[in-house]
Image (cartoon, rainbow, N blue to C red):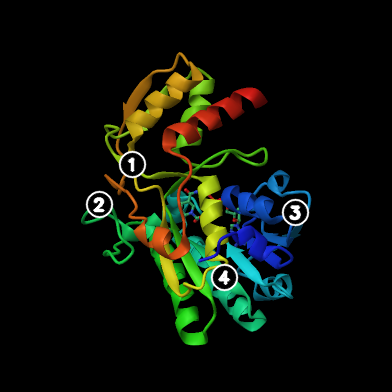
Amino acid sequence: MSSDPAATLAGQSVLVTGGAGFIGSHIAAALAEDCEVTILDDLSTGDPTAVPDDATLVEGDVRDARAVGQAMEGVDVVFHEAAMSDVTRSVRSPVEGHRRNATGTVKVLDAARRADARVVTASSAAIYGHPDSLPVHESDRKTPTSPYGIDKLAADGYTRAYADLYDLPTVALRYFNVYGPARGEREPAGVVSAFLDRARNDALVTVHGDGTQTRDFVHVDDVVQANLLAATTDEVGAAYNVGTGTAVSIETVAERVIDLVGADSRVVYDDPREGDIKHSRAAIGRAREQLGYEPTLAFDDGLSTLVERASVSN
Ligand code: NAD
């Protein structure tokens, strides 16, 4: 395990696919000062204002092998974040989702194989579907309930296969529910941002279902930490959960957000989302032991920081 992954990566050439998006832009920002950072993003949902000044933005598509091959020239490490990350959109457009999330990943891995570049792939807790027991371990049953989860399972499997078959150093990171500040003008997707937006406008905060469903919310800074560790570890060819190991109910999130913002909002309940998972919580022992990953922000602290930041910039 690497003691200071950022120092190990200093001077290297890094490609961040989807680097104009929420998580990719944070990874790019963490490395832009000491590495040569290129971002490949088709800007389908990404925000150019999120791209750090020191990084080079190449507008291109991970489905386009030529664009990927060109962006990969001389690259040492790839952080593959590009995806259609909206589960609802993947249900509406499964073919497009498959191309962006599964085919796009194979193209990135294949270009990396030719360039001999290391790859860290963004996988997802969505690959597990409804867990049999909690916390969810990496080896648990995987029965994804959405096209998004199915494509991410393929991406996760291809990432491992490229290590097994071609000796490419790859790691898949299975993110749980990532939250944190936007780097650019576009707010990240997800329930925390949505609730914050409503509370800041003193509007009704809508919870789907009865609000007792729970999620493992992990701060984007800790997701960046996991990525840097994965980019420098010897423990390649494996997948790791990236969460905190604790879960919070959606109703609690709504109440905390309203309280921290000091809003006059009220929580209202709507129909449950179809296929919604009741409980999700990561077992993070493998990431701890093999990568040296340790979440640094408990949800309450991460949320307070986010609300403070939002009120400063408003
Ligand atoms: P995001 O939507 O903010 O970022 C995705 C980026 O990929 C966008 O900038 C988009 O323009 C770009 N993109 C999409 N299709 C592309 C293509 N074909 N070619 C090039 N660029 C393309 O999403 P995010 O929240 O930053 O997620 C990053 C990664 O982490 C994704 O792979 C997502 O599936 C995964 N993930 C996210 C979460 C979360 O809670 N945010 C949880 C689990 C997994």
Taking the image in four quarters, ligand 1 sits in the one at bottom right
Q: Residues within 10 Å of mark 1 (few under 14, many from 20)?
A: some
Residue at 60 percent of width and 61 percent of height? 5
Examine the rendering and report whether any part of residue 15 can be seen. Answer: no
Pointer 3 local density, CA inside 10 Å: few below 14, some 14–19, many at least 20: some
Is label 1 or label 3 in front? 3
Please give the label number shown on residue 33: 3
Q: Residue at x 49, y 61 (%)?
A: 97
SS for tag 1?
loop
Lower sequence index among marks 4 and 1: 4
CA separation, marks 2 and 3?
A: 39 Å
Between circles 2 and 3, the one closer to the viewer is 3
- Mark closer to the observer (3, 4): 3
Q: Is residue 73 visible?
A: yes
Q: Amino acid at mark 4?
A: Val
State which tag comes first along the sequence, 1 or 2.
2
Instruction: Evaluate if marks 1 and 3 touch, with contact meaning CB atoms under 8 Å apart.
Output: no
Disc number placed over residue 134 in the picture, else none? 2
Q: Position of residue 218 (x, y in %)?
A: 45, 45
Which one is earlier in the sequence, the residue at label 2 or at label 3?
3
Q: CA distance from mark 3 to mark 4?
A: 20 Å
With respect to residue 153, does 88 lie above or below?
above
Classify residue 8 by image quadrant.
bottom right
* Residue type at the position of mark 3: Glu
> Residue 247 shows which numbered tag?
1
> Disc 1 versus disc 2: distance between alpha carbons?
10 Å
Contact between labelled residues 2 and 1, with CB atoms less than 8 Å apart: yes
